[in-house]
Image (tube, rainbow, N blue to C red):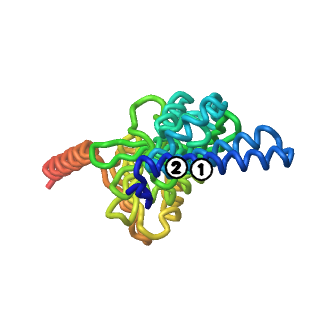
Amino acid sequence: MRDGFDLAPGRLNLFIVRATRRIEGVAARLSEASLPRFGMIATVVIAGSVAYGIAYGGHTNELLDDFGQPLGFGIDQVGVHGNSETSEIDVLQTLWQTGSQTLLSLDPTKAREALEAMPWIDRASVSKIFPDRVDIKVEEHHPYAVWQTGDSFFVVNREGKKIVPYTPGRFDNLPVIVGDDAAAAATSIVDDMESFPELRARVAAYVRVGARRWDLELKNGVKIELPEVKPIDALTEVVDMDRRYTLLERDISVVDVRLSDRVVVRLTPGAVKRRNERLAERDKLLKRLRKEKPV
């Protein structure tokens, strides 16, 4: 039983003979109607292929290719458009892996799905141009950020979809985002940082905290802890303080603006040590002065 037909060898041959006679009849009528020779041949080939495919079952593509190759329907030309990160060779290899050798057997939908499964390709379209050409148009992902999740790094697009693993070099200028859900939420902070170009250039990483808010880690080691609500308003205050007092260039480790009514600044361990040393020296000086004070 194949595709609903149970044909013994003798009945199979009879089926093929009858199908062929019907095809010949179609060809004769097309000829009498003065249709272009190409259209007549294509119709005959497709009809014949369908008949054989039904008869044998499961081998339609091979039969279509067997019919199409000698009649000039082989895929001899492939145009690839829109690719930048994806090489034309990789596109062609993916097309060949569909198994089709002629336009008759090529399924544009399956070819498109295979192309869109490639790392850099976001969308693709596949068009058959008879007799022997395939036209492929692709839209590639645009790299948006480098995402660190655990010990792994990936180049991602605006939607947070992984494109390719990150390797140092080409994408070093992309913002670095850190955290399990950071990729999907990155636009909420990275796009808004366009308003602060000077500060943006000093950010080493955007760290997602508790799937709720962001910390900015600056290249000089200072961390800015932003609130969950209205983080840009808080950041505006930090930028203003930096312009007035060079806050972010001082010997500090953290600027905490999570509370709306205050800014908390924490010193670096070295600054704390030096501060304690200065306080200790002041205490010694005061004690000495008290001892030296006349009675």
Most foreground residue, 18 or 146:
18
Based on the displayed image, in which of its 4 quarters is residue 133 positioned? Answer: top right
Based on the displayed image, in which of its 4 quarters is residue 92 positioned? Answer: top right
Label 1: few (<14), some (14–19) or many (≥20) C-alpha neighbours in 10 Å = some
Q: Where is residue 135 in the image (x, y as percent from the top left)?
A: 66, 38
Residue that mark 1 sits on = 19
Q: Where is residue 137 in the image (x, y as percent from the top left)?
A: 64, 41
Dot label at residue 14: 2
Q: Which of marks 2 and 1 is nearer the N terminus?
A: 2
Label 2: few (<14), some (14–19) or many (≥20) C-alpha neighbours in 10 Å = few
Q: Is residue 176 above or below residue 92?
A: below
- In front: label 2 or label 1: 2
Amino acid marked by disc 2 = Leu
Please give the name of the residue rendered at 58% of the width and 45% of the height, measured from the top-left corner. Answer: 49
Q: Where is residue 167 in the image (x, y as percent from the top left)?
A: 39, 32
Q: In this view, does 65 lie above or below 158?
A: above
Most foreground residue, 72 or 134:
72
Q: Is residue 108 above or below residue 76?
A: below
Q: Is mark 1 on a helix, strand or loop?
A: helix
Please give the name of the residue rendered at 57% of the width and 49% of the height, measured from the top-left corner. Answer: 50
Please give the name of the residue rendered at 64% of the width and 34% of the height, measured from the top-left corner. Answer: 73
Q: Can residue 288 be seen in this view?
A: yes
Q: Where is residue 108 in the image (x, y as percent from the top left)?
A: 58, 47
Q: What element carries label 2?
A: helix
Q: Can residue 197 be seen in this view?
A: no
Most foreground residue, 88 or 93:
93
Of the 4 image quadrants, the one containing the N terminus is: bottom left
Of the 4 image quadrants, the one containing the C terminus is: bottom left
Q: Residue furthest right?
A: 34
Amino acid marked by disc 1 = Ala
Q: Is residue 208 left or right of residue 12?
A: left
Q: How far apart are marks 2 and 1 (CA)?
A: 9 Å
